[in-house]
Amino acid sequence: MPALRTTDLIGRDAELEQLTAQLGIRTSGERSAEPAAARAVLVGGDAGVGKTRLLMALCDAALEADWQVVAGHCLDLADSSLPYLPFSEILGRLMADLPDVTGRVLEVHPTLARLQPGRRIRSSETASGDQALDRGNVYDALAHLLAAVAERAPVLVVVEDAHWADESTRDMLSFLFSRPVPGVALVVSYRADDLHRRHPLRRQVAEWMRLRGVDRLQVEPLDDDAVRRLVRALHPSTLSEAEYVSIVDRAEGNPFFIEELVGAAWSGQVPGELADVLLVHLDRLDETTRRVVQLVSVAGRQVSHGLLSAVSDLGSAELEGALRNAVDAHVLVASRGDTYAFRHALLGEAVYDDLLPGERMRLHADFVAALGEGRAIGTAAELAQHARRAGDRPVAIRASVEAGEEALAVGGPAEAATHFLDALELVDTAREPVPDVDAFALARRCAEALVASGRVPKAVKVLRARLAALPADGAAVDRGQLLTALASALLLTDTTDSPREIAAEAVELLRGGPPKLLARALLVHAQSLGEWHADEARSLALQALELAERNDLTSLAVELHATVAGLDPAGGTSPSVGWRAAAERARRAGLIEPELRALYLLGRHHHDEGDLDTAVAVYREVIARSEVGGLIWSPYPAEARLLMAVALTHQGLLDEAWALLDVSGQNPPMVFEWLYFAHQMLITIGIRGRRKEAALERLRDYWSTDGLTAISSGGAEIMRAAAAGDATLALSVYDDVVDAVVPVWHEWFQARLRLATLTLAAFAAAAPRQSADERESAAHDVERLMADGARVIDFYAPYDGSHGPEYRMWVARRTAEHLRWRWLAQVDPPTADELVAAWREAEETAVAYGSVPEVAQTRVRLAGVLRAVGDAAGARTVADQAREAARALGAQPMLDELTAQGSAPAPATSAHTATLTPREAEILALVAEGRSNGEIGKQLFISTKTVSVHVSNILAKLDAASRTEAAAVARRRGLL
């Protein structure tokens, strides 16, 4: 049978030239001494479009240029993820080709040895504790290894099929993209048509593309001329035009489809459906070879000769003959490492789908037997996949648990959670109990992995389901442990349930039980009480600490020190000392999660104290340490990212805050994705005044997932309404936010003070344009908002720790906004001195906190007040300060408010434009609103006679006979 694959690269010369030029391998057909335009390239394209063939040509070009080439492949293991798989392959290749170099690196980074292909096989031991693979060490070790290899010659690293990459592999690629290794070029391929909207790689590609030195090459379908050239290369004999047209039309420029269609045409068979084309080679194979090909399709995309030998019932000679036939027929290809794979992944999928269900189950069962009996080597993830598809529940459950533990050991909590969830599903749907499987322990372990990967609501759901399945006469110890885990998870999410009550029940159930379980329950109960019941919490935490230390429970003792530090500062010192000590103690013990919690609490403390610089530094430390432990989306680091953005926003670094929350290309838990987006919209819409109505509508769907999402998003809506002077809308949004937050927090949550104050500002902005009746009606709403703020202040009065500089800022601002409304609405107006004093106090508290946006906004309002009371010089000084800050922030609503006050520089006038003084412009605006001279005088703190004089001057300058005509002329000339 003639070859149906050409060694020539047809129709891809431009792409190859671009790749070699970008990576500095070759330019215009010759080696280039010019520096590479890119250090990394993403190669995307549809399945079968020719990405692999292009990369093979690139590797050949690199070898010709005396480069070193290593490649790793991501495999489709369905849900049975194997962390860092392509890098295990790369490590194995380097160990075989450069044992001296890899040996030196492994001496420095011994943990990297756990990624050796031979170390990924199943064993009776699962790494834990100090054996667990630390992500930071893996990243640094791989970079060190590649750098050492690059000392000999430039290195081209190729990672294929990243659309199948596990989360840990994607994180490793992000590390390599963002921190280039000198002398190393990285090329990553992926199927573009696989990247559906929710595919984790879709956003990651977008994130990688924003990095400097990373380019993307999209491999497009071949044009018609190239298709014809490829057909002629594959089929030298003459084809009819109808045959050419059929292939061109049906192949749509996809080289794989072209090869298959040409193969069918060569045999005289032109199938009617593409599936027939994919399977046409099997129809021409003998029965034995077809059975072997089917076996390979069940194994996955790639399978070792040893595993095939163990599973197949053929003798060695017969198996080798069948494999030879499959390779010659271009169905399989022989790869390095004594493995076989389908020439195209789509062909393997088609072969697998063509099997009958019973055939698939039987063949998967053969793989289970071979792997389980030790006749072949493989990973726990592989065994779990085969056992699940073979319907062997006991083996699938045990292998899934083992795969989950392995994933946790190498810093892959998301993959671990997937394996544990698979195991739980199999346990729950089994007709009979599975021997030697503790479903309650598995549920707790699954919840731990889910929390570590940031999927706290899912962890809560898993624990609730297990509690519901607990028999009425179930062991108190089982229920106590589940309740402890549930209370701990609920503390990390917004919920209408009471973690305190659940934790208290757990403590009672575990009294008299194992000390470790009781100490854990006491710890969670103490955390649930927090500062609201500090004395009781301190007592419980100290009981737990004494229990942990008496029973040598080191990890629990470390966690408890962090809790006690916040409740019982030593010697009256700041709790920051205790939290820093607890973090260092946890780091020395190698306990990353307690360390992250202690650092997070330390950052929160500095934030609450108004030390924004230190808070930002600590939050950065939390995020950096979470990357080392593979816990970037666990609750404390994920929330630290948000709080760091909040602190940066107060510091006026809006762009940096926005970028920090941009998780494009990453795969955060949904709750954090929308929480981050809400704060971004607070910046974009609330502060900068840009119009994005659709974004705010989308966010409302997620208000119930997290109280902060509702507060940030609702705050942006209120600020937008205030800028438009729409008090009714602002009040409606305020009520909606309260309705969303109260059920999951409590009625008088602290942010309600800020929201009520922002809504008061909206009423003040609307007052000048309201009639007397409207202002009287608004007074009832204003009084309700003031009462809400007062209740919040009263609620937090006993808790001194809640009276930080931000709290004091909003207390002062609330008073100032209320007086401003009374002044503008002429409802029991304050004196000029009272009004100015209130806004001076608001300015001082904002400056004391260091919030750049709030200082700017306060000064905008203060400038208006000073201008109204006749302090033109003071108003000009404050307005200039506010204008400078607003411009730096890009805060258009503040600039617009300054302009409306008449504090912006007056525009140049023409002969046809009247020149009004700032006071005349201010009075003209009120005249246009229909205000009487008396009302204007009261609002501006000047006499009615003075207003009358100004009105007369305005009429003269505008050549108007009446107030109504003056308003019309002013609008026509752009003076209003």
Image (cartoon, rainbow, N blue to C red):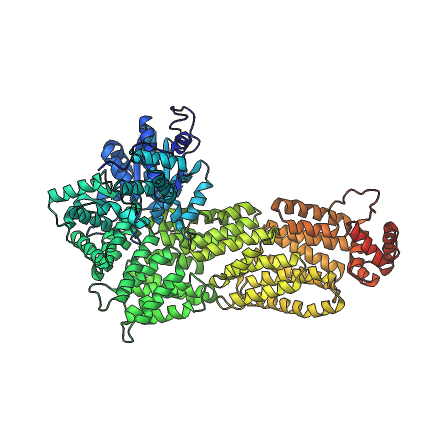
Quarter of the image holding residue 785? bottom right
Q: Nearer the viewer, residue 744 or 866?
A: 744
Q: Residue at x 23, y 35 (%)?
A: 96
Counting from the top left corner in percent of width and height, residue 610 is at 54, 52
Q: Nearer the viewer, residue 901 or 109?
A: 901
Q: Residue at x 66, y 67 (%)?
A: 782
Q: Nearer the viewer, residue 796 or 116?
A: 116
So how many labels did they put on this image?
A: 0
Counting from the top left corner in percent of width and height, residue 494 is at 45, 63
Counting from the top left corner in percent of width and height, residue 319 is at 14, 44
Instruction: Mark yes or no: residue 688 visible.
Output: yes
Taking the view exactly as shown, the residue that stands out farthest to the bottom is 472
Instruction: Mark yes or no: residue 512 visible.
Output: no
Quarter of the image holding residue 250? top left
40 left or right, relative to 390: right
695 left or right, relative to 506: right
Quarter of the image holding residue 912? top right
Say which quadrant the N terminus sits in.
Answer: top left
Counting from the top left corner in percent of width and height, residue 898 is at 70, 50
